[in-house]
Image (cartoon, helix red, strand yellow):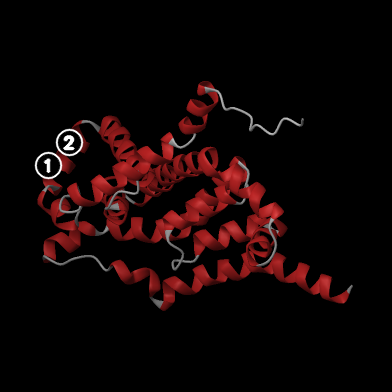
Amino acid sequence: MQDTTMPQTSPHETRKGLARYLPLAVIGTVAVAGAFLLRDYLTFETLAENREALIAYRDANYVVTALLFVAAYIAIVAFSLPGAAIATLTGGFLFGLFPGVLFNAGAATVGATIIFLAAKYGLGDRLAARMDASEGTVKKIKDGIREDETSYLFIMRLVPAVPFFVANLIPAFVGVGLTKYVVTTFFGILPGGLVYTWVGAGLGEVFARGETPNFGIIFEPHILGPILGLVALALLPILVKKLRGAKQ
């Protein structure tokens, strides 16, 4: 008779399989807890109330302040905690447009990469393999991204309408390489980060007037126009390939 018994999974393999999901589980748990526990603290009002103490500490401990700020920003992004916009403003407020924009973009990139690696390690490789084996819309999406990964990744970062968390996960699920992900993330978020860091650098005057910063400034024509121009440049290689394919 033919042996039809199913192969047994060893306890070691089971533990190894569960360990793949541990980073995502930790990120998800901290994100949920942070959404409830920190939403009232990581706000513009908190920054306004503590601005003098922050400036005094920065002046006395510049390097330590920079390291603590970058570490906090990484944690905010990596665990999808509330307050990323406030953190960007704080970077500009404490460190100016430069090096504030480098602290902001660098920390955001590291935090996004942590999510990317957790998703890729836990689900990404398996989902990528399933997409390769699938048909229809899902496979077309992946094939479209694979056709010109760099352009698609830049567009996801440049367009403000794409949620940052979503832009962290999609590349992991379609098998994007780490180096390309890091490079496109850093340079893709740099234009928007530059705008908000610039707003943060001018918070002293905003505080003096008792006002709140304009978080919607990125959608104003003189700001959004250049960003859309960068999107058009990122789209150009895709359009050229489409036109060449149509002529063949």
Name the residue rendered at 64%, 63% in the picture. Answer: 141
Answer above or below: position of 38 versus 145: above
Q: Residues within 10 Å of mark 1 (few under 14, many from 20)?
A: few
> Judging from the image, what secondary structure is the residue with disc 1 in?
helix
Q: Which residue is mark 2?
A: 57
The image shows residue 179 at horizontal and vertical percentages of 61, 41
Q: Residue furthest bottom?
A: 221
Q: Quadrant of the C terminus?
A: bottom right
Give residue 81's position: percent from left, percent from top. Answer: 30, 48
User: What's under tag 2, amino acid-wise?
Assistant: Tyr
Question: Toward the viewer: 15 or 94?
Answer: 15
Can you tell which quarter of the image residue 43 is in? bottom left
| Mark 2 Cα-neighbour bin, 10 Å: few <14, some 14–19, many ≥20 | few
* x and y, in percent, of residue 63 in the image: 30, 31
In the displayed structure image, the side of residue 226 where residue 23 appears, left or right: left
Which residue is denoted by mark 1 in the rendering?
A: 53
For this view, does 20 lie left or right of residue 208? right
Q: Residue at x 51, y 39 (%)?
A: 122
Tell me the quarter of the picture where residue 246 sits. bottom right
- Horizontal side of residue 241 vs 82, given as left or right: right
**C-alpha distance separating marks 1 and 2:** 6 Å
Q: Residue at x 64, y 29 (%)?
A: 7
Quick one: 48 or 110, which is closer to the camera?
110
User: In the picture, which quadrant includes the N terminus?
Assistant: top right
Amino acid on which disc 1 is placed: Ala
Q: Are marks 1 and 2 in contact (CB under 8 Å)?
A: yes
Where is residue 127 shown, x and y percent of the image? 59, 49
Q: Secondary structure at mark 2?
A: helix
Mark identifier at residue 8? none
